[in-house]
Image (spheres, rainbow, N blue to C red):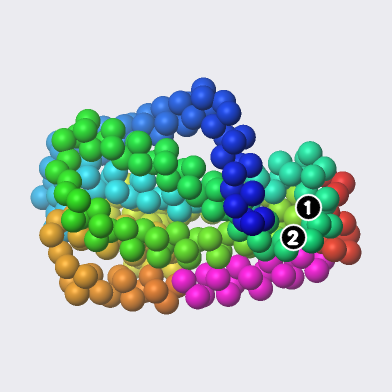
Amino acid sequence: MILSAVVEKEFRMFFRYPLRVISSILVGIVFLLQFVFFGQAVLGGRYSALLEVSTGMGDYPTYALIGYVLWWVSVSPMEAYVWGVRRELQRGTFEMNILSPAKIVELLSGLAISWLLMDSVLMMIVFAIGVVIFAIPLTLLIILKSLPIVVASLIAFLGFGFVFAGLVMMLKNIGPFAQIFEFAMLFFSGVFFPLNVMPKAMIAFSKLFPLTHAAAVVRGLFVGKGYLEVWGEVAWLLVLIPVYWGIGYLIFKWAERITRVIGYGGY
């Protein structure tokens, strides 16, 4: 009941202003196009034999579109925890919600899920526009096979997002830190370029991000591979889910204990 109420509230607030929705879509499209056209300029065209050898996918617009959409949706829970909780703190409503019978984890989960759903809607629109602009071949079967991988990646980041929820309660403003993490993930997960161009140490570090494996699996499915052929990446993703949730929960509970002493207010 509380979860659905939080989701409904966030949806009402977001879609109450149509220009905000339109601007989010336009920003998403512009951000995508600049990277795709820049990549094509560097590669000398849409298709790259080198990219295909490195990743199994030679069509750069398809490669970039998959990585970009997955990245945007993956950072959505973290954005919700950082900016959603900060907004409630600024309004003075967060502490009142804490004092209510509702559990704090339930409140935060509703916040994250609502932002995730909203960003998913926006990204589906951006993805559809990208498919049309770049004439990317797409079938219903590919979409259905990709959905479990996308969901698994999102589950991992929903758990890890509690790290940011705890830190924003304690420190109030961690926006710059969150943005560093988000853009580090953009870099280390091979969203716009193949990971094998990086030093071996960075390649090893990139395996700690669920997005790295989710993007690799979905790209593999797009070029006709089956789950058995990408099972190594799937296994990594499944292992990271409990790890991310464990880290997120432990840090959140630590930050919550400190915040209960210093107080939730005083933003």
Q: Residues within 10 Å of mark 2 (few under 14, many from 20)?
A: few
Residue 231, image quadrant: bottom left
* Mark seen at residue 196: none
Do we see residue 180 in this rendering?
A: no
Nearest the viewer among 178 and 157 is 157
Q: Report helix, strand or loop for mark 2.
A: loop
Q: Position of residue 244 (x, y in %)?
A: 52, 70
In the rendered image, which residue does mark 1 sit on? 97
The residue that disc 2 covers is 102
User: Pointers 1 and 2 in contact (CB under 8 A)?
Assistant: yes
Q: In the rendered image, which quarter is residue 55 located in?
A: bottom left
Vertical order, 255 against 6 (above or below): below
In percent of width and height, residue 257 lies at 80, 68
Question: Residue drawn at (23%, 38%), measured in percent from left and top?
Answer: 131
Depth check: give the residue in front, 45 or 157. 157
At label 1, which amino acid type do we have? Asn
First along the sequence among labels 1 and 2: 1
| Quarter of the picture holding the C terminus | top right
In the rendered structure, which segment of residues is drawn in magenta?
A: 241-258
